[in-house]
Amino acid sequence: MEVLNPGLEGDDTPDAVLLVMAGQAAAFVGDTEVQLRYLKKAAEVAPEVISIRTELARAYMNQGAMQEAITELESIQHLDEEHRRTDLLLINAQLRTGDFAAARKLANDILNKAPDDPGAYVLLGSIELIAGDRQQAHQYYLSALRIQNDYLPARLSMARMDLEDGNLVVASEQFDRILLIDKKSVAAMLGHAQIAEQRGNRDQAVAWVERARSADKNALLPRIVLARYYLLTGDAEAALTIAKEVNALKPNDVSNLLLLGRAQEQAGQTKDAIRTLEALIASNPQIISAYLDLANSYANARSYEAARNILKDALKIKPDLLQLKVAQVRLEILAENYSTALQLAEMIQRQHTESIEGFSYAGDIYLRQKQFRKAQYAYQQALDIRPTAGLTIKLARAYSADGKSDRALRVLERGLDNLPNDVTIRAALAASYQQRGEFTLAENHYQDILKKQPKNPVVLNNLALLYLEKDPVLALGYAQEAFGLAPQSIAIADTLGWLLLENERLDEGLAILQRAAAKSNEPTVQYHYAVALAKNGKSIEARDRLTNLLENGEDFKERQQAQSFLNSLASQ
C-alpha cells in the first residue's frame, strides 16, 4: 500500500491496474470494505475490462452481496461472448440465492451453443444436484460420459453421488477408473479415503490421504485433512509439519493460521503459537476463535493475566457469546481462583438460562473443593435442563466421592435408560459393576459395547482385568489387543505387563512394566514393576523400590499386597 498510494492520490484519474492491485492488497490483510471500494473505482475507470468487473463481482459474492454480484455480472455478459467465466460466475451467484430456474436457463443457453461439450452437461448436472433432483443430475452426468467416456468431472461427480448414497462398492470402482485415467487424481484418492473411513478402516483412510498429499505438492485439502487428523490423534509433530506446508502454500489464510497455531501449541511450541495467533488477531481482529486459542496458549504458559485480557478483548466484540464466558470460567479453574470461577459460572446461569454450562462448571468447582452435596445439586440442575452422558457420569462421580456408591449406580442406570445407545454411560456403568464385584453384569455391558466398537482399547483393557483371576489366558488376549490399539497408555501397558507375569512370560512382562514405571509414578504401576523385578531374580532392587513406595505413606489399592510381598522378600 505504501508503494501504491502515490499513484492513487492527486487529481489525476488513477490507473485501473493500480486500483485492482490496491484492492488485492486490502483483501490480503482482510480489509474487504477497502477492497470493494478500490475495485468499484477501477470498474468506473475501465468499465470495458472484463477481468476487473468479474473481480468486483467476486468481491461482492465473498461479502455475501449476491444481488449486487448478479447485477454486475449481467451488465457485462455481452462483453464476454468468447469465454464462459462471466456466465459461470453468474450461475454460481444464482445458485447461492436459490434461483435455480435462472441458473438452469443460463446453463441451457451454454449447452445450446456447445451441444457436444461434456462440461455443459456436468454444469447442468451440478445445478440439479444442488436443487435436489439427484436422478436428473445423474442423467446429465451420463450424457457427459456418452460424449467423452474419460471426462473426469463427470466421473468424479457420479462417484461422489454413489459415495453419498452409500453405494461404496460402485463408488470405489468409479474412483479406480478415475485413477486409471489420472493416476495423480487427488479427488479420487480422497474419495477412496472417505470409503475406507466409512468402512471403519482408519489406517487405510489415512494412507489414502497421505498418498493424495504426495501426488500433488500444491494440494491443500489432503494436507488440511491430515493436519487436523494428527491433531485429533495427538501426533503433534506430524500435525505441525503439515500445518507448515499448508501455510507455505496459502499464507495469511485465517483458517490455515489457526491450524498452525493449534499445531504449534500441541507440539509444545507455545511461544510460536502465541506469535502466530497475535499476528492473526492483528490482521483479523474479528476472528473470535483466534482469541480463544491465544487465551489457551497464554494459560498453558501460566500467563493467566494475559489470557484474561485476551478474553476481555474478545467479549468487547461478542459480549453475549457463551463460548467466551465458558473460557473465562475454565481459565479461573486452571488458575485455581475458584471463587472467581464460581462467580462467573453463576453469571452464566443467570444470563444463559437454557444452557447447562453454568451449572456444570459450578459442579466441577464444588467437586474440586470437596463440597459434594453442592456439586450433586449443580449437576442435577444441569441434567434437568438437558440430559447428557457427560453430566450423568459427573453426577455419579459426585455421589461416589461422597461415599454414596449405590446412589451413583442408580444415576448411571437411569442415565442408560434415558440414553440407551450411549457407549460412555454404558462403559461407566460396567466399570461400576466391576468395582462392586458384579462381574456378569459388567461383562454383559462390555460385550455390548464391543459389538458397536470392537476396537475400544479401554473396554478391552477392562475385560482383561475382569478375567484376570478367572481365565488369565483369555485376559492376556484382551490385554494384548488393547495394547496394540493404545500402546501409549500407561494403564493398558500395566495391565498387559501384569498379565504376562501371571502367564509366566517373565522377560516380556518385565520389559513392558519397566517402560510403564519409567513414565509413571502411579503406585500400582511401581508395585507391579517391583514384582516383575523380583520374579526375574532382581530381589534387592525390588526390595528397595517397595520400601520407597511404602514409606512415602501414599494409599493405593494394592498397598496391603505390596507390604506382604516386601515381607516375603525380606524373609528370603
Image: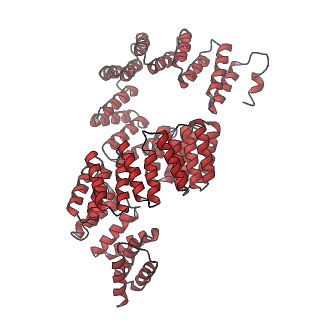
Q: Number of marks in the image?
A: 0
Name the residue located 33 percent from the left edge and 86 percent from the top edge: 568
Residue 297 lies, in percent from the top left, at 57, 51
Q: Is residue 558 above or below residue 365?
A: below
Q: Quadrant of residue 137?
A: top left
Quarter the N terminus occupies: top right
Q: Does residue 422 appear left or right of residue 305 in this picture?
A: left
Q: Quadrant of residue 384?
A: top left
Q: Report whether residue 241 is seen.
A: no
Q: Is residue 8 above or below residue 495?
A: above
Q: Does residue 412 appear left or right of residue 524 in this picture?
A: left
Q: Which of the two residues, 414 or 150, is positioned nearer the viewer here?
A: 414
Residue 17 lies, in percent from the top left, at 68, 21
Q: Is residue 299 above or below residue 277?
A: below
Residue 457 lies, in percent from the top left, at 33, 57
Q: Which of the two residues, 211 or 407, is positioned nearer the viewer here?
A: 407
- Image colouring: secondary structure
Residue 306 lies, in percent from the top left, at 63, 50
Q: Residue furthest bottom?
A: 571
Q: Report whether residue 143 is seen.
A: yes
Q: Does residue 137 appear left or right of residue 99 in this picture?
A: left
Q: Residue furthest right?
A: 10
Q: Residue furthest top?
A: 78
Q: Is residue 249 above or below residue 343?
A: above
Name the residue located 62 percent from the left edge and 32 percent from the top edge: 30
Quarter the C terminus occupies: bottom left
